[in-house]
Amino acid sequence: MTGFRDKAGREWNMKTYAEMIARTTTMEAHLTGTANWLLENGYDLVVISSHAGSCEKCAPWQGKVLSLTEKTPGYPTLKDARADGLFHPNCRHAYSLYVDLDAEIEVTERETTFARSDDSNSGEVQQDIGSAVPVDSIPSAVKRGISKALAEALAHGARTGTECLLTLDASTGQPAYERVDGTTYSVQFPETLIEFLRKADRGSVILIHNHPSSSSFSNADLRTLAGYDPIKGMFVVGHDGTKYYVGKRDAQVTVETILKTYEKFARQYYDEYYRLVNANRMTPEQASKEFSHRVLESLAAELDLEYRRWDTP
Ligand SMILES: [Zn+2]
Ligand SMILES: [Zn+2]
């Protein structure tokens, strides 16, 4: 896990950093950080910024959509653009996430990942998760299964420092698919799980996973929630014991809407948390956690999703 160092020399969390992908910057290191995060989250397309008075070399590339890796056919690659002179020294151009949903979904459908959560697990993870699951829309019999699954995900995280994904039947709380073990940064959906999620009834599945960083849902998590009708809701348990729930009510939310809304609020709140870290009023880890929670609160209110965060004492 590498962070970057801001002016105050403090390490700012890479995940949070990457969530400001829309901020333009000319520094190569920042571009590389953005690219890494985008790739880790399954994105491939970026759009080049536009400025008045662009240098001649870059003018043809302004506003163009590029593929970082060549995996999305039909777009020039970042390599092509560089070879043509884009991002020359002192270039003011930058790139940010571009979502071509048809193309991206096709490519990433089979490799959907939960976003990376950084850092190691601390040795002192709470094992007693309790039975409280303060989500009104879930029946109490199902809550028992969820408590068990949250405890299992947390124990897995404490043992391995990696993520795992549990799939429960939303009407019984019983496992509906075997546990999927991930890496430090992600969980890959096996093809059979994707098939299962495609065929299951609407609102019949609850997903549970752990976040070593203890931050709230990532935009990749939300993409999964919106992308599969059968998913009623998702729980995340942080390695510090914080729990989160996001779930659908009646309204349909599209992947496009959820990602755009996430980006909107991430842009809106980023600077505030960046300044708190620079002023030593929050650690990067705290800022990352609070920032992600704030984005989710606003997103849930706007899209009429159910959203909760709680701690079990
Ligand atoms: Zn330039
Ligand atoms: Zn996640």
Image (cartoon, rainbow, N blue to C red):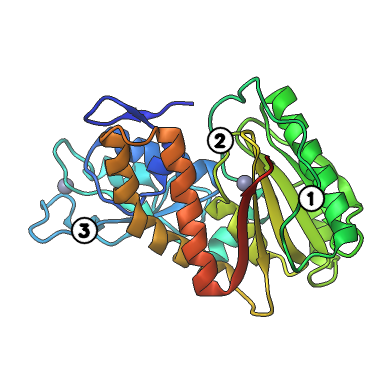
Amino acid type indicated by mark 3: Pro
Find the residue positioned furthest to the left: 53
The quarter of the rendered structure image containing the C terminus is top right
Which residue is tagged 2? 213
Of pointers 3 and 1, the one earlier in the residue sequence: 3
Which residue is tagged 1? 191
CA gap, disc 2 to disc 3?
41 Å
Q: Does residue 22 appear anywhere in the picture?
A: yes
Q: Does residue 133 appear to the left or right of 117 in the view shown?
A: right
Classify mark 3: residues with Cα within 10 Å, few (<14), some (14-19) or many (20+). few
Q: Does residue 189 appear to the left or right of 103 in the view shown?
A: right
* Residue 293 rendering spot, x and y as whole percentages: 50, 52
* Residue 74 rendering spot, x and y as whole percentages: 47, 60
* Residue 33 rendering spot, x and y as whole percentages: 38, 37
Amino acid type indicated by mark 1: Glu
Task: Give the residue drawn at x 7%, y 58%.
Answer: 53
Residue 242 is marked as: none
Q: Is residue 17 above or below residue 177?
A: above
Find the residue positioned furthest to the front: 313
Q: Is residue 42 above or below residue 164?
A: below
Q: Nearer the viewer, residue 151 or 63?
A: 151
Foreground tag (3 vs 1):
1
For numbered disc 3, what is the local secondary structure? helix
Classify mark 2: residues with Cα within 10 Å, few (<14), some (14-19) or many (20+). many
Which residue is tagged 3? 60
Foreground tag (2 vs 1):
2
Of pointers 2 and 1, the one earlier in the residue sequence: 1
Of pointers 2 and 3, the one earlier in the residue sequence: 3
Q: Does residue 98 appear anywhere in the picture?
A: no
Amino acid type indicated by mark 2: Ser
* Residue 303 rendering spot, x and y as whole percentages: 54, 73
For numbered disc 2, what is the local secondary structure? loop
